[in-house]
Amino acid sequence: MDARQRVAVLVADAGTTHAEQAGIEIADRPAELWQLLMLSNLVSARIQAEIAVTGTASLVAAGAGTPAGTLELDWQQRKDALIAGRYQHFADGTATRLGECARLAEGEYGGDLRKLAAASQGRPERTRALLQRFPGIGPAGAAAFCREAQAVWPHLRPALDPRATAGAERLGLPTDPAELADLIDPADLHRLADALVRAALDPAMAERVLAASPDSAEPAGV
């Protein structure tokens, strides 16, 4: 199995991205970008990604799908939404941080994170730095945001951070981001990035991909 086939098998095995699992349609629109920022905030904690996914979905269902909507919820309502989404252990601090993030998003960007992309002037490192101004978003959270946002912010491509390249190494794939990016359609780079992180964290998934027959793979980008 060549590298392109292995990437195709990996992406197919991974299925939907974490953002999609949370019900977020990755789009260059204010609501979806805010929801992605919330997910990136939740996943930054030492917690399973699946719980960050359910916590984000619960927040959106409670009305926190935009910065303004998040601010309409009081601290207790945000906490209750997190707990309803099984995000119990960090609910108190996260409820506080999300309010602070929403105020920053409203104050700096009018609730529209597309203005953050514009302020970065097409520089990925600047985008990551601006993201890290949000409480709770550190380097890992900014990387998580960029892995998904590269689907709609081309200036981030290839957003293949060390967590992703660790998955590539486990699968015998190139670890250079540019070489990895050449193995898939640019529009699907966010799927590859998400799948590589999963492979890094899930040895069983990596074993499935490595054991897969070349006949089971479709051309990358399909």
Image: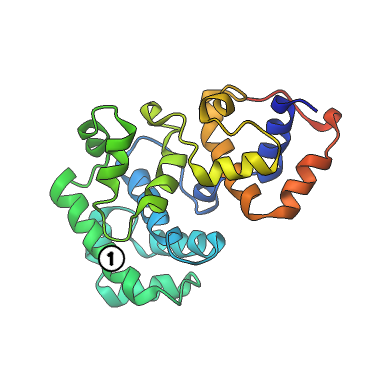
Picture coordinates of residue 43 (x, y %)? 45, 59
| Image side of residue 66 versus residue 110, left or right | right
Q: Report whether residue 16 is seen.
A: no
For badge 1, the amino acid type reads Arg
Element at label 1:
helix
Residue sitting at 57 percent across and 24 percent down? 179
Picture coordinates of residue 123 (x, y %)? 29, 30
| Image side of residue 72 versus residue 91, left or right | left
Residue sitting at 76 percent across and 41 percent down? 209
* Quadrant hosting residue 191: top right
Image color mode: rainbow
Rendered position, 36 above or below 119? below
Which quarter shows the N terminus? top right
Rendered position, 137 above or below 17? below
Residue sitting at 69 percent across and 39 percent down? 10
Residue sitting at 33 percent across and 49 percent down? 34
Picture coordinates of residue 109 (x, y %)? 18, 44
Q: Residues within 10 Å of mark 1 (few under 14, many from 20)?
A: many
Picture coordinates of residue 139 (x, y %)? 37, 50
Q: Report whether residue 214 is seen.
A: yes
* Quadrant hosting residue 30: top left
Find disc 1 in the rendering and name its residue.
97
Give the number of callouts. 1
Specify the farthest residue to the left.
107
| Image side of residue 59 versus residue 118, left or right | right
Which quarter shows the C terminus? top right
